Amino acid sequence: MNMTSLLEKARKELEIAKVHAAHDGKVAQTTRQTAVAAKAKLKQARKLSKFTKKVARKAEDQAEASLETLEKAQARLEKLEKRARKKSRKGKSTAQPAAKKKAATHSPTHHVKRRAKAAPVKVTPPAAKAKPATKPQPKKAVARPVVKRTVPVKPPVSPAPAPAQPAAPVPAPVPGTDTPPVSA
């Protein structure tokens, strides 16, 4: 091999090496930029994750507190209903025996009536009936139906011949509609 061919070969290798070096440099730079961006994204993701966990803990605590409040309110309601039932029974029992005693002393068969009497029936006044303690359901948003307006298609206007008689006045359109009223 002569020297010229060796020089040419060496120059080609140098050009190829330059191209490869430039390409590898670009790839390295892009990779560095991607790594920096990924690190920033990771940092943001960690912050977001931390914030979300904090909000979730607060929400759980709030839900727990709300549940406790609900249970307390339910227990209090049951207690009040029980007290109201007792009061209504007590009020009925004190008023009824006095009336029965008077009737029983005058009736000779008052002992027979007692034996035939059935067990007292529990009657709760309508106001004191227990209502199930349920959480009020949130109102669901109702989507409005889509109303499409239809625009009447107007036929192309053609030049009309001049009328021989004077035309009747055109009535004004009715407010709220696109069409004029029909004249008789």
Image: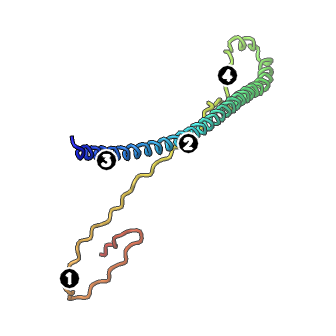
Q: Nearer the viewer, mark 2 or mark 1?
A: 2
Alpha carbon distance from label 2 to label 4: 66 Å
Is the residue marked by circle 1 packed among few (<14), some (14-19), or many (20+) residues within 10 Å? few
Which label belongs to residue 44?
2
Which label belongs to residue 15?
3
Seen from the viewer's position, the closer of residues 183 and 75 is: 75
Q: Nearer the viewer, mark 1 or mark 4?
A: 1
Is the residue marked by circle 2 packed among few (<14), some (14-19), or many (20+) residues within 10 Å? few
Seen from the viewer's position, the closer of residues 8 and 1 is: 1
Residue 20, above or below 83: below
Residue 54, above or below 107: below
Q: Quadrant of the N terminus?
A: top left
Residue lying at 36% horizontally and 69% vertically, measured from the top left:
178
- Give the residue type that dot 3 points to: Glu
The residue wearing badge 1 is 160
Alpha carbon distance from label 1 to label 4: 91 Å
- Give the residue type that dot 4 points to: Lys
- Give the residue type that dot 1 points to: Ala
Is the residue marked by circle 4 packed among few (<14), some (14-19), or many (20+) residues within 10 Å? few
- Give the residue type that dot 2 points to: Gln
The reply, left or right, for residue 53 in relation to residue 30 is right
